[in-house]
Amino acid sequence: MSAVAAAPRVVYERPAVLTDVSTRYCPGCGHGVVHRLLAEVIDELGVAGRTIAVAPVGCSVFAYEYLSLDWCEAPHGRAPAVATGIRRVRPDAFVLTYQGDGDLAAIGTGEIVHAAARGELITTIFVNNGIYGMTGGQMAPTTLLGQKTTSSPTGREASLAGYPVPMTEMLAVLPGVAFAGRGSVADPSAIGKTKAMIRKACEAQLRGEGFAIVEVLSNCPVGWGMTAPESIRHLKEVVVGTYPLGVLVDRTGGKRNAGAPHPAPSARATRSGATAQEG
Ligand SMILES: Cc1ncc(C[n+]2csc(CCOP(=O)(O)OP(=O)(O)O)c2C)c(N)n1
Ligand code: SF4
Ligand SMILES: [Mg+2]
């Protein structure tokens, strides 16, 4: 009697959007995990062909080499403004920004706040590693109190440098924001929940529901002066104390605040003479 071989079950494969190259990231850096999640979601939604992503300045500046999409490079912090322009002239496009915390929460504070306030139909992936990774580990607005960085060698003091800025909570109160959440790359469970939030934030754009953002707490072992495992422990045990995980606002699926003075996306598209092509 001949045994019938069971069909192999695929448990892991490279998302089509993720290019087969080695990244320049330090060993253990969380940016690679976030890239993979984004690639998986774009594959699943089938939007790679119409995606235009905007790259930041920071360690992930070369994201355009790692995700096989159309990319545009924005000056530091300006990704939401660049994405706004792209989305308004190309209403058929699926538009993303990928930004670090120095990029989004310091240099580009104005751009992100106003893009969110306008309810721009863009999706922002905000990688918060609490530090300016690329330039040598300086303090960012997101740096924790007491955290030692190259520009706060004795630890961040509130009396000198203020308090950590919870950008995503601040954005979540704006009625133009359809979805805001915070995930982490600390362990498989957190990574799975982060992916679900990224998917939700992408779907919000596809349905024309407004601006959407997912903050992802990530590690920077080099900038934090830790080994990779130490940095993951720190992320799990310390960083979440300042930046709690979870969905911060979800106005998708018709859950928009009743009192929000926010024009429907289709109305805005009509004003510019364009037709919204969502979904
Ligand atoms: C207008 C401007 N200011 C400052 C810089 C220098 N700069 C380049 S990357 C960077 C830090 C990026 O940090 P972050 O956005 O947190 O990204 P990470 O490297 O941590 O992922 C800075 C300050 C710049 N390129 N342009
Ligand atoms: S400096 Fe930090 S954020 Fe940049 S690649 Fe290295 S670990 Fe990642
Ligand atoms: Mg950073």
Image (spheres, rainbow, N blue to C red):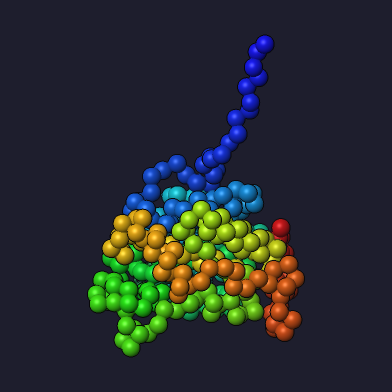
The x, y position of residue 188, in whole percent, is 51, 53
Task: Tell me if residue 137 comes above or below residue 60 in the rendering.
Answer: below
Left or right: residue 7 versus residue 96 is right
Residue 93 locus on image (x, y percent)? 62, 58
Q: Quadrant of residue 162?
A: bottom left
- Residue reaching furthest bottom? 159
Does residue 120 appear left or right of residue 70 in this picture?
right
Image position of 249 with respect to 235: above or below: below
The residue depicted at 46 percent of the width and 59 percent of the height is 186
Specify the quadrant of the image occupied by residue 200: bottom right
Q: Please give the name of the residue rendered at 53% of the width and 40% of the height, measured from the top-left corner.
A: 12
Q: At 58% across and 36% down in the image, what residue appears?
A: 10
The residue lying at 45 percent from left, 49 percent from top is 66
Image side of residue 149 versus residue 40, left or right: left
Between 17 and 215, the residue placed more toward the observer is 215
Q: Residue furthest top?
A: 1
x, y (%) of residue 79? 48, 67
Quadrant location of the N terminus?
top right
Residue 255 point in image, percent of width and height: 73, 73
Q: Nearer the viewer, residue 121 or 256?
A: 256
Relative height, residue 275 to residue 258 (above, below)? above
